Amino acid sequence: MKKQLYPRALILSAFLILYSCSAEKELVNETTNQQVEIPLEDILPQVYINTNSQEIPDEPKIIAEISIENKGELRHEGLIGIEIRGQSSQMFPKKQYGFETRDSENQDIDLSLLGLPEEEDWILHAPYSDKSLIRNALIYDLSRDIGRYASRLVFVELILNNTYDGLYILMEKLKRDKYRIDINKLKSSENEGEDLTGGYILKLDKENSYNQSNSFTSTIRPPNSINNQQIHFVFDTPNEEDITDEQRNYIKSYINSFETTLNSNQFSDLENGYSKYIDIDSFIDFFILNEMSNNVDGYRLSTWLVKDKNELLSIGPIWDFNLAFGNANYCGGERHDVWTYKFNERCPEDFWQIPFWWNRLMEDSKFKRLLQQRWNFLRNNELSENNILSKIDNYVNLFESSGSREGNFRRWQIIGEYIWPNYFIGGSYQDEINYLKDWISNRMAWLDSEIDKF
């Protein structure tokens, strides 16, 4: 694969970037002629992708070449299958990509990239409307801090077909895998007894259309909805092509039994209530992560449900928080003083509504007591304000020392511009970070007060 080392100089207009072969790169301001040297060890990993003049489609994946350099050393070189990914994010000029690592015979191959555990499926996430660049990274890191798996990640810079494309995040794609969602691999031959009990992965998420092959529908309408909206459970693992009729009927019946029980007068009974069906601790942590960030998509989109063999239904991992932390100008997404789980009350006309689960769980004194205890513990530990703000400072310092923040916003000149669905539009990157920090401080204080009332 032919490439120019660190070709960022090809696209920056106000800055010329020079590189010594062994030690450092220099940012030269062509207006002031001042040089800023960036040591080689501070430069983010560089991901080079060459599609050989092919345009990357939404699907199917095309064959391309990839090489990854870190601190001046080649860490990986080979083939990939790559496509554009995402839903609403596809409107943005800075695209995000999904790719599979391939061998010389163009077969999928598990590889470790930049120290992440071996797998074949990867994502290059492209922060764009999130001008802080860190909302997803922050919440994923916090999720792992509290003991809940979330996609591991590495900040990188992407050079696509010899054009510098800015700061990206190399991430693990969520899937069943011993290093990711570690559950039993359900075979098509496993159709009875305990074999039938797992593992399943379902999603509440957008689909081009919902049908009996790819999903099933809740029998209970979402609260406060006004347009006869329904809750759809999408088959992820096994997917619609691989799942058998017996497996489809089992997981559908399990969800239906859970919902029927939760909706009953005996829902909070310790022996025969909803606790027979769900891992309550996972639901509490999922609630905390969505509420602390007021994720406007929370509970209703990008929501994963996992049922392993002989285990209760759990919720998570979390996914897609780029519109969280006050970065949405609709349905109260900008506010620090509303409950996220009450989205339906604010936007009853939205097509994707929140299931009745959360309203009902918050009627159970035991669930609220456990939630309060978990919240207070985490606030004194992993979710302390000092810990959260320190993480933000570490990201910002990383971007500053590597020159990647400067490079990204010269490639994508969006600071001070409205990008859907921004609520706050800062005049500088630091304004965006200050807004995020202030929003988090206000949000956590509000939640402290509200949860203390349980």
Image (cartoon, rainbow, N blue to C red):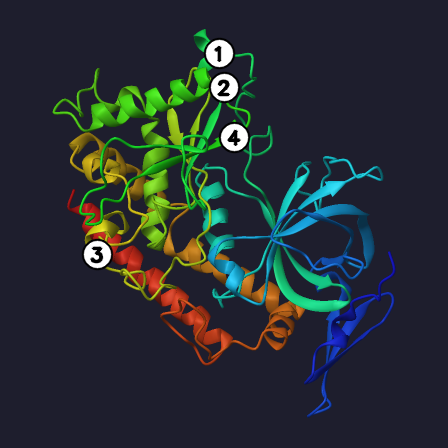
Residue of label 4: 239
Circle 3: residue type: Arg
- Does dot 3 land on a helix, a strand or a loop? helix
How many callouts does the rendering have?
Answer: 4
Can you see residue 380?
Answer: no
Q: Earlier in the sequence, mark 1 or mark 3?
A: 1
Position above or below: 448 against 35: above
Label 3 with label 2: CB-CB less than 8 Å: no
The C terminus sits in image quarter = top left
Tag in front: 1 or 3? 1
Residue of label 2: 244
Tag in front: 3 or 2? 2
Q: Earlier in the sequence, mark 3 or mark 2?
A: 2
The N terminus sits in image quarter = bottom right
Can you see residue 260?
Answer: yes
- Residue 354 lies left or right of residue 161; in this view the side is left
Q: Earlier in the sequence, mark 1 or mark 4?
A: 1
Circle 1: residue type: Asn
Position above or below: 436 against 450: below
Q: Which mark is residue 346?
A: 3
Label 1 with label 2: CB-CB less than 8 Å: yes
Residue of label 1: 191
Circle 2: residue type: Thr
Pinpoint residue 48: horizontal percent, then vertical percent: 76, 58
- Does dot 1 land on a helix, a strand or a loop? loop
